[in-house]
Image (cartoon, helix red, strand yellow):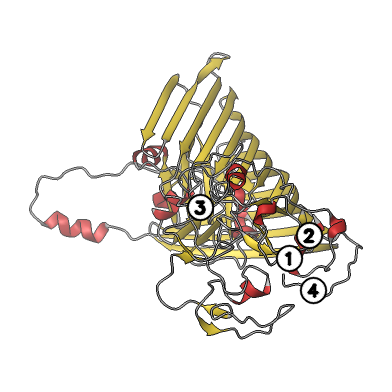
Amino acid sequence: MNFRKKSVWLLSSIVSLQLSGTAVQAQQAQAPKVARVDKSLEEIVVTARKREESIQDIPVSVTPFTADSLERRGFTGLDDIAAATPGFTYEGFITGGNHGNAVIRGLAQQFTTSRIQNVSFFIDGVYLQRQSMLNLGMIDMERVEVIKGPQNALFGRNAFAGAVNYITAKPKAEPEAYIAVTVGDNERQDVKASFNGPIALDGRLLAKATFGFSQYDGHTKNDHPMADADPTGPSTTGNLGGWDDEIYSLMLAYEPTDSLMLRTSYYKNNAEKETGAGYSISGVNAARFGLRLDNQLDLNCNWRTVNDIGNPSPTAAHSGYSAWCGELPTTAAGAEGPRTQDGILIDPRGIGQVATTEVITFTADYELNEGWTAHYLFGYADHETYSTGGPGGEDPLVGRGIAADFALNAANNQDPNGYKYANTFSGRPNSVLESFSHELRFDFDSGDRYRMSLGAYYSKTEDREHSTVFISDVCSPFTEEQRQNCSEPMSTPSSAVPDPGRLTTGIVYDQVTRQHANTRLEDTSFEDEIIALFFSTSYLVRDNIDMTFEGRLTHEDKYVFRHADPFGLAFGESVTYRLPEDPV
C-alpha cells in the first residue's frame, strides 16, 4: 500500500511554416491559359486543439476520418483506423482487445497491461483510461481523429505519443432517419438504425438516438476438432477473431438562446470479442513451470542459460532448450503421445474479451462576447471487462501435466505415472473502473491573428484490476466425457479447482498458486485524483508563419491498495515456500 503525490509541469512550443503559393501562382499567370478542372477539397474540421479548426490551418499532424470515409471504406474498429494511418499501429492480441496496445511513431509503453498508456483516447472529450476501452467500434461516429506527437499540454501527460479522439454524431436541425444493413461471409451481420432532428420547443430541442449491432465469426480457421462445440455463454465458436458488438447512443441538444448551447449524451458499448489466432511453443520456462513433461516436444536449439529452480535437469532430448531453429512444427505432444495437427488450435471455451463501457456527458458552450467563449464539459465513465485470455496449455487437446496431488474431476485424465491433465485459462488484467471529470475552458479569438485558450481540469478515478485463473477439464474428442466438457461455460472458475486443504507441496510459482484455489490473483485497487491548469496561445506572425505556445500544470494524488499479491496472498498473510516433492 502506498500514497504518492506528483506534480508535473509541461511546456511545449510549436512553430508552423505554412508555405504560400504566391510564387507558383505568378509563374502560372505568365503561362498560356488552359481549361482547368476544379479540384478543391471539402474543408475538414477537427478538434485536435480542443476547438473547431480547419485541418489546413493547424500546426499539428492529424489524420481525420469522417463518417462518410468510415462508411465507404468499411471500417469496423480501431485496427482499420491504424492500418490506414501512417505512424500509428494498434494490436488487440489474442485477448481481442483486453490488452489492446496503441503505438504512435514507435513510442510504445513498456508493458501492454499498463494502466497508463502513451496514447490517450477520448470519446466526446471524456478520457478512456483502460486498454479494454480503446476499441469502441465505428457505429455512430461522426469523426475519428488520430493526433500524432506529444499532446500533453491540452490532453494530459498520458498523451506523450499522441491522442485519438472519437467524436459521436450530433443531432441535426433537419429531421433524418435511416436503417442500414450489411451482410457478408463468415456470418457477418451489421444493423444500424438512427433518428435525429428537432422534437420540441420550436425546434430548439434536438435529439438523436442510435442503435446498432455488429456480428462476425472471424476469418481465421480454428483447427481444434471441437471448434463448433458452441459452449454456453461467451466463447470462441467456429472461426477465430470474431466479435459481437452492440451500441446504444442518445444525445439531446438544447439552444435556449443564440449564444448558449447545452448538450447531454449517453453512450453504451457492449463488446464480446473472440480469442484471436495464436501459436506458441515455449522453452526453458516450460520445464521450470511444469508446462512440459519428459519426452515431450520442446524447443530444439540454444541450450538454456539459466539455472533450474525447483526441478531436476531435463533428460529428454528436446526439453531443455530456449529457442527454435528452422520451420515451425505442426507436431505437438502430450498425454496421448506425439500427434500431428495442422493449423492453429484454440480451445473453443476461451474468451478474448467481454466488456461494457458507458459514458455520460454534459456540455455547455456560451458565447460571452464577440471574442470570448466559455466551454464546460462533465464526463462520467463506467467500465467492466474480463477475459480468459485463451487456454494456457501448449496443447489444448491434451492439456498440461499437473502434480499428482492436484486432484481433478475427470479420472480418465490420469496417466500411469499419477499425473492428471487439464487446460488452464488465465485472464489478466480484468478490471472494473468508474470515473468522472470536469473541464472548464475559455477561448479567445481576435478574429485576425491571435487566439488563446485557458482552462482547468479535475478528475477522479476508482479502478480495480485482478487476474482470474480457470482450471478446466480437457476439451477434446478423445472420450465422451471430454467431448461434453467442451460445452461448459468459462464465466466462472471451473469446479476442477481443488480444496486448499489438499495442498501438500507448498507454493512454487504460478502453477502451484492455483492449488491455493484463489480465483482473483493479484487483486489491486487504484484511486487517481488529478487537478490541472492548462493554456495555449497562437499568433499568426505572417500569412505563412504561425507560432503556438502551450503549457500544463498537473497535480496528481494516487492511492494504491494491494488486496492480494501475484501468489494470491492477502495483505499480512504469509506462507511457507519449499520445493515440491514431485515435479511441478
Mark 2 Cα shell of 10 Å, populated few (<14), some (14-19), many (≥20): many
Q: Which amino acid does label 1 sit on?
A: Ala
Comparing 520 with 391, the one in front is 391
Judge whether 190 appears above or below 133 on screen.
above
Mark 4 Cα shell of 10 Å, populated few (<14), some (14-19), many (≥20): few
Q: Position of residue 103 (x, y in %)?
A: 51, 61
Q: CA–CA distance between discs 1 and 2?
A: 10 Å
N-terminal of the pair, mark 2 or mark 4, is: 2
Name the residue tied to disc 3: 276
Q: What element carries label 1?
A: loop
Q: CA–CA distance between discs 4 and 1?
A: 9 Å
Quadrant (top left, top right, bottom left, bottom right) of the C terminus = bottom right
Name the front one of labels 2 and 4.
Answer: 4
Name the residue tied to disc 4: 581
Name the residue tied to disc 1: 403
N-terminal of the pair, mark 1 or mark 3, is: 3
